[in-house]
Image: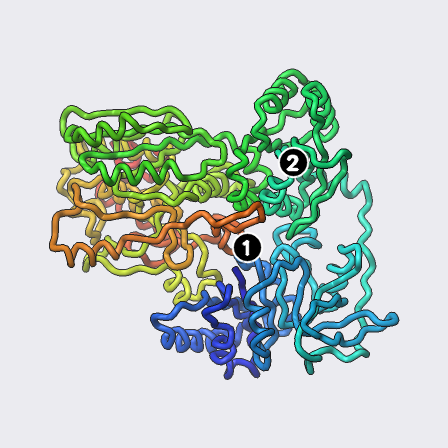
Amino acid sequence: SLTAVLPVTTTSLPQLQVLLRQMFSSHSRLKEAILVTPDELVREARKVLWELTSTLHGRDYPNISIHPVKNGSSTVYNILDTASEASTDWLLILDEHGLRGVDSQTKDMLLNPKAVSLPYGPNGQAYRANNLSCVETPWSLQPAAFVVPPMVLPATILFSGSEDSNRAPTFRTWEEMGYRISHSQLDLVGGLVFGSAQSDRCFSPGDQLVVLPDPVVKEDQVQASGNPGRFLVILHAINDLQSFSVVLCRLQEKSYTVKVILRQAFYPSDGQTQSVFACDLAYDNLPVSSSEVSAQLSETLFSFQPNVVIDTSDDAALTNALRVILEGDLELRQPTVIHLPKDDLPYSDWMGALSLQEWKHWNIPRVDVSVITNDRPTSLGRLLRSLQRAQYFGDSLDLRINMDSAADSEVKRLVSRYRWPHGSTFVHHRIIHGGLLPAVVESWYPLHNDSFGLILEDDVELSPLFYAWAKMAILHVYRYGNDDTDTSRLFGISLYQQKTIELRPEGRRPFNARSLFLREGLQHINTPYLSQIPCSWGAIYFPEHWREFHDYLSIRLSELRLPISDDVVPALRSNNWTKSWKKYFIELSYLRGYVMLYPNYDNFTSLSTNHLEIGSHVKDTPKELYEQKKRLFHLPLLTLPYHDDSPVSTGILELPGRTLPPWSTLPILDHQGSITSLNDIVDKGSIQRSHVFSCSQPTSVVYDARDLTCV
């Protein structure tokens, strides 16, 4: 996928609609357009966007966002700084002219990126006799010292020369960028040019390249800063290296040291290098003999001292040798050992977004899967098949299937025949009908504070990539990342995208997070966000909050502090959901200011969907009305991309900066789908708590329902 970065100027603003329309094509990989806009032009640019999008109703078009910049700063710097925050693999860098004057063949080359690891475009300059001159541009690609807009480049190239792996280098001219890129190449090529003729936008031969000194890094500076992390990666064969290369290259971009060992040797000597799309990866071969394998592994572990070992070899003898070495050598740093099935490697691009701290906690969180079913065998079968088809990246997950007393023989037969290969299976059957509220609430209880519950009613279906999103989010935003930010108000991670807001007093209303964020002027409309609404259509709940919910529900049902018929939260439709567990979790999230993380992918692409089948909360209605209602909630699922050992994008990282944003930057929505702040919802909940429970003292104990309700 491709992001276009277009600078807006006072000259180009009147033609902005035309410039944007020239980029829209049905045969294009363009996913996103970012407008680099001076502060004083933002309001006018936003007005142009509204006028444009109103005329495109019903048509597919890229996501368009505005990136404000200060007037007077370097245009090139602003463009590249903005481009570094894009979520796609490819970038189309434009100047204020956009694609105006570009012929159709060139336009097609720019809007459908080719597998080229350098910047390319129709305009650039080449070295000739120590001077720079315009490149004659026939249709074959030719080397250049640097390329100027319009040009395409892989997003990874922006970070390859940066001291900070999370920011692009501060280039202020295209010549400077070309120089840096060329000096990272053995052939000193800074880009490639193509086209049908010499462009009138090519720089004059008199424009000289700004020659920059090579950076000098002293050894003591490296020692003082410390190595940011070492990864030992054991792969089976060269095709596995290609499949996993997206992750390995991203690790190298972050200045981590990566050492790769191949189990299946194709070359007799060590020290081979594999050139892949994003970087060069050196690797060694393991010997064939088992005794030699153990000796080389031991030597490598002792000399390299990795923080993380990733074993994808599918070799039981090698895995056992690794375990014996690590357990037997007390002087060896004990790394985190991660076993990844080789079949999952093509879908692992999201792992490149993890920090060293998150990698080191890989084996700590444990997700338990809890399925709630009654008398819908077809629905249950679909859910279990979607669970079976998902990628779990070597993790073990226990499965609990909860059958209500009315479960029929077909449901019982389906459950008895089901084989779950990723952990243990436990089946629970109620003998007295309790309804959906106790069925859900009692379906899971955390064993410890690293235990997470995936709650699934049987009319839910999962994306095969749901666990990638869940694992990444748990590691990043819960408690396992580098950030010491307090995330104690995060109660879970939704797999489902919100398409409808159900809680407004006037009734259901359509909801589109991206449209809301565009309207509110947020910088990244594709950002995930936090919402106070608990999801019941595929979500992971956190241990402390679920325990507190159990206690809170016990207090509410006992009527110890409040009659069960009394409303706790003002003006929400959930007050009428007397048989729903969500009514009470909404109360808890309101009183505490709790939030859940929601995905926000294009076209409502989701990690779970709901089939809205007849059951406890969905009554039998006329077919036309039922289908209309179903369309409000049914979402397309994120699917596995096709792969042939080449690196692929799963779509999980179609996020700002190709990573989950920091906690403090996530938008926060209240129960009615309006943007708010964490302080506001906490204050609002505290005031309501005092009013409802007549509490004179503020809460003093986290996750304590008795303290919350002043028992």
Q: Nearer the viewer, residue 517 or 59?
A: 59
How many numbered markers are drawn? 2
* Left or right of 78, for residue 586: left
Does dot 2 land on a helix, a strand or a loop?
strand
Give the image location of residue 337, x and y in percent: 58, 28
Which residue is the site of mark 2?
A: 231
Give the image location of residue 32, x and y in percent: 49, 64
Q: Residue at x 37, y 32 (%)?
A: 543
Q: Nearer the viewer, residue 135 or 362?
A: 135
Residue 639 vs 482, above or below: the answer is below
Does dot 1 land on a helix, a strand or a loop?
helix
* Left or right of 656, for residue 609: left
Q: Quadrant of residue 223?
A: top right
Q: Residue at x 32, y 48 (%)?
A: 609
Give the image location of residue 621, x and y in percent: 12, 52
Which residue is the site of mark 1?
A: 657
User: In the current view of this chain or complex, which residue is farthest to the right?
Assistant: 129
Q: CA distance from mark 1 to mark 2?
A: 23 Å
Q: Quadrant of residue 169?
A: bottom right
